[in-house]
Each structure stands twice: as C-alpha cells, then as structure tokens.
Amino acid sequence: MKTKASNEFVLEFPSRSSNEGFARAAVACFAAQMDPTLNELEDIKTAVSEAVTNAIVHAYPDIIGKVQVKARILPEHILEVTVRDYGRGIPDIEKARQPMYTTGGEERSGMGFTIMESFMDKLSVRSVPGRGTTVAMKKKLAPRVKSIR
C-alpha cells in the first residue's frame, strides 16, 4: 500500500556527474518546506549525493543513461527520496551494501550505501541485473514549533 504524499516531485536527468549537485540542490529546496534543521538538511543532501553518484558511476560506467529522483512528503513529517536508474543493476545487493565494497575502481571508497544508511532513517535497495536499481530513503524530520508573535 502506497502512502499518500502531501507534496512530491519527480526529476529526470542524464547520468552526467555535473547533474549530481543539481539533484542534491533540488531535493534540498523541496525539503526546505518542511522546515528542517541545518543538520537534517545536510544529512539529506549527503544521502542524495551518494545515491545519485552511485547511479552515475555504477549503473552507467561506459554510457550516459537516465537517472530519476523522486521526493515525497509523507505524513508524520517524513521525507522520502527515491533514486532510480535503468542501468546494469546490482547482482548481489547484500555484498554491495557492505562497507568498502566497490565496483568503481580504486578511486571509489565503497561507502555509499553505508553513508546513506547513517544519514537517513531507512534505506531500501531493489535491483534487477540489466534493468536498473532503485534506492529508497526515508528521514523523519523533527517538527519545529512555530513561535507566535
């Protein structure tokens, strides 16, 4: 059962590394309507950066493909961000989620999923080899008390 969102957006772009910052900024601007703390906003931006970078680097190592970012505001002050690619997929998700594991060469740390998990409250990864990967992340933001003046 899909939870009804009070607001959402979908963004699609080519898997160029220059678009990672654009996706991060777009999600941060969207999340701003929830009045997050600066720390919450930085956590969200970091997790989105990691997910989008994974899609760019690992899903399409030799070609330019399509990356989709979707953000939704769910009940109880929860932000859900989904990053999807249509690339080569992950043959072994459990192995890919282990710290220090990478298929991206020596310049990659292999910490992407670990970082996403540490900055968000929930992380799920679905992948079909040859068809792509979907990373869904959720973060419950602290409700802010509005002062009355």
Image: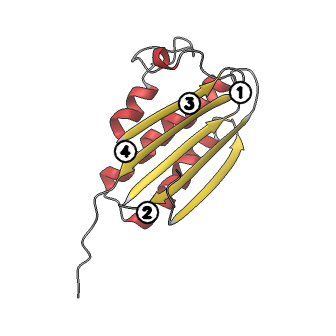
Task: Tell me the crowding category of disc 4: few under 14, some 14 to 19, or many 20 or more residues within 10 angstroms, Cα based.
Answer: some
Q: Amino acid at mark 1?
A: Arg
Q: Nearer the viewer, mark 2 or mark 3?
A: 3
Is the residue 86 above or below the residue 130 in the image? below
- Residue highlighted by disc 3: 126
Front tag of 2 and 1 = 1
Q: Is residue 50 visible?
A: yes
Earlier sequence position, callout 1 versus callout 4: 4
Q: Quadrant of the rendered structure where residue 130 is?
A: top right
Q: Nearer the viewer, residue 147 or 25?
A: 147
Between disc 2 and disc 1, whose residue precedes?
2
Q: Which residue is mark 4?
A: 43
The amino acid pointed to by label 4 is Asp
N-terminal of the pair, mark 2 or mark 4, is: 2
The amino acid sitting under disc 2 is Ala
Residue 22 visible from this viewpoint: no
The residue beneath circle 2 is 32
Give neighbour class at mark 3: few <14, some 14-19, many 20+ (Cα, 10 Å): few
